[in-house]
């Protein structure tokens, strides 16, 4: 089954585009939500992370301690890279298992990072990049997450997308009706890559 990667920076509107695709009956796998779910449901992943960091990452009731993990990662790019080396393969395995259960012409994986991570290269067949002006992205992310502008700007500066690997772009700078129209056009363009030929 073919897979479309929907990617884009913080506040660009990836989730809005994916919601429109779901309305069309296209299954969507949200990588961020999946990672959070795996922390709570995959004991092997938690054990691997505890072994990696040399400390327990579970609360007294057995639930995963996200706050403790965040404290370990704070301002430490090496620890973040080590975490990703454990979590990203777990997400990829979960996605592949999910995709094998779907009945659809193609599926979508929503991810801000997959385009820049070679591990995911074989997981998708086409790339749709969602964009928006920086000021609009900043306002959306601050409103949605309650984040400080400086923190959002720092995340925006860390996100880069190789346009040479993008098959279609949707600019999410107006209203939902316009986004729906632009998404429909992008899917028509991408259908040659994603839909089975007779």
Image (cartoon, rainbow, N blue to C red):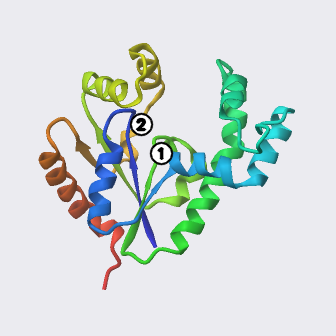
Q: Nearer the viewer, residue 166 or 146?
A: 146
Quadrant housing residue 107: bottom left
Q: Is residue 89 visible?
A: no
**Which residue extends farthest top?**
150
| Circle 2 SS class | loop
| Labels 1 and 2: the sequence-earlier one | 1
**In terms of image quadrants, where is residue 129?**
top left
Report whether 19 appears left or right of 61.
left
Per the rendering, the mark at residue 115 is 1
Label 2 sits on residue: 161
Task: Rate crowding at label 2 as few (under 14), some (14 to 19) or many (20 or more) other CA atoms within 10 Å.
Answer: some
The C terminus - image quarter = bottom left
Residue 7 lies, with reference to residue 72, above or below; the image says below
For disc 1, the neighbor class at 10 Å (few under 14, some 14 to 19, many from 20) is: many
- Label 1: which secondary element: helix
Left or right of 42 on screen, residue 112 = left
Compared across the picture, whether 57 is left or right of 92 comes to: right
Residue 97 in percent (x, y) is at 60, 68
Residue 153 is drawn in which quadrant?
Answer: top left
Is 53 displayed left or right of 107 in the figure?
right
Residue 153: mark in rendering: none
Q: Residue at x 59, y 45 (%)?
A: 36
- 117 and 43: which one is in front? 43
Q: Position of residue 45 (x, y in %)?
A: 74, 50
Q: CA distance from mark 1 to mark 2?
A: 7 Å
Q: Is residue 69 above or below residue 163?
A: above
Give residue 1's position: percent from left, percent from top: 46, 73
- Give the farthest residue toward the bottom: 198
Residue name at image x 36 percent, y 31 percent: 144
Residues at badges 1 and 2 in contact (C-beta under 8 Å)?
yes
Q: Nearer the viewer, residue 102 or 82?
A: 102
């Amino acid at each position: 089954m073919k897979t479309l990667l929907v990617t884009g920076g913080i506040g660009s509107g990836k989730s809005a585009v994916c919601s429109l695709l779901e309305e069309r009956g296209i299954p969507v796998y949200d990588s961020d939500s999946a990672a959070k779910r795996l922390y709570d449901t995959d004991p092997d992943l938690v054990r691997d992370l505890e072994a990696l960091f040399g400390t327990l990452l579970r609360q007294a009731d057995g639930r995963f301690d996200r706050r403790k993990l965040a404290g370990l990662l704070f301002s430490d790019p090496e620890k973040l890279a080590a975490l990703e080396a454990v979590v990203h393969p777990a997400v990829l395995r979960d996605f592949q298992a999910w995709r094998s259960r779907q009945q659809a012409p193609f599926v979508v994986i929503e991810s801000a990072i997959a385009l820049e991570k070679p591990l995911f290269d074989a997981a998708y067949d086409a790339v749709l990049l969602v964009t928006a002006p920086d000021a609009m992205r900043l306002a959306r992310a601050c409103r949605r997450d309650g984040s400080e502008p400086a923190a959002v700007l720092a995340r925006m500066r860390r996100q880069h997308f190789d346009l040479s690997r993008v098959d279609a772009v949707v600019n999410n700078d107006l209203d939902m009706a316009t986004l729906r129209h632009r998404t429909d056009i992008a899917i028509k363009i991408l259908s040659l890559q994603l839909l089975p030929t007779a």
